[in-house]
Image (cartoon, rainbow, N blue to C red):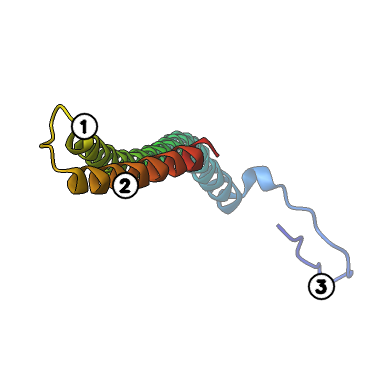
Amino acid sequence: MESPLDEEDGTFTNISLADDPVYHSRKRSSKVERAPATMMNADMDAVEAENQVELEEKTRLINQVLELQHTLEDLSARVDAVKEENLKLKSENQVLGQYIENLMSASSVFQTTDTKSKRKSWKKAIQLEAHVLSIKKHNEN
């Protein structure tokens, strides 16, 4: 609190704040204001800690989702590879089936005595055998 100017001699008069009721009421209100601020800081710390826990949980879940996505991509690639291999094997089985049919038809055990049909069957069998060998060479590479 400012000291009033003594108009008579131009000097200041000291007034004790201990006796000033306005000073005491301001002092009390500042203590009251500090208490909620301290409580607010504690509340803010608790909220901040809770937010940190939530953030860590979200991060963990995001990482788990990413890991599952990578696993799904790997499995999908494996399924595609197995499907491709399956188609290739079906094709090879079909060629081998035709080869066996032609061998059986060219064989005297399964054939009539017609010589022209024997030659045609053997020719088909040789062509299929060449095709089977080319497939095997291709698969080895």
Dot 1 or dot 3, earlier in sequence: 3
Query: Which amino acid does the dot numbered 3 rest on?
Result: Glu
The answer to whether any part of residue 110 appears in the image is yes
Provide the secondary structure element on which disc 1 rests. Answer: loop
Closer-to-camera residue (35/6): 35
In the rendered view, would you say 12 is above or below 89?
below
Dot 2 or dot 1, earlier in sequence: 1
Pointer 2 residue? 123
- Residue farthest bottom in this picture: 7
Separation of disc 2 and disc 1 at Cα?
12 Å
Other-residue count near label 1 (Cα within 10 Å), few / some / many at <14 / 14–19 / ≥20? some
Query: Which amino acid does the dot numbered 2 rest on?
Result: Lys
Based on the displayed image, in which of its 4 quarters is residue 24 positioned?
top right
Closer-to-camera residue (108/55): 108
Total labels: the figure holds 3
Q: Which residue is drawn at 39% across and 46% down?
A: 131
Provide the secondary structure element on which disc 3 rests. Answer: loop
Which circle marks residue 7 in the picture?
3
Pointer 1 residue? 107
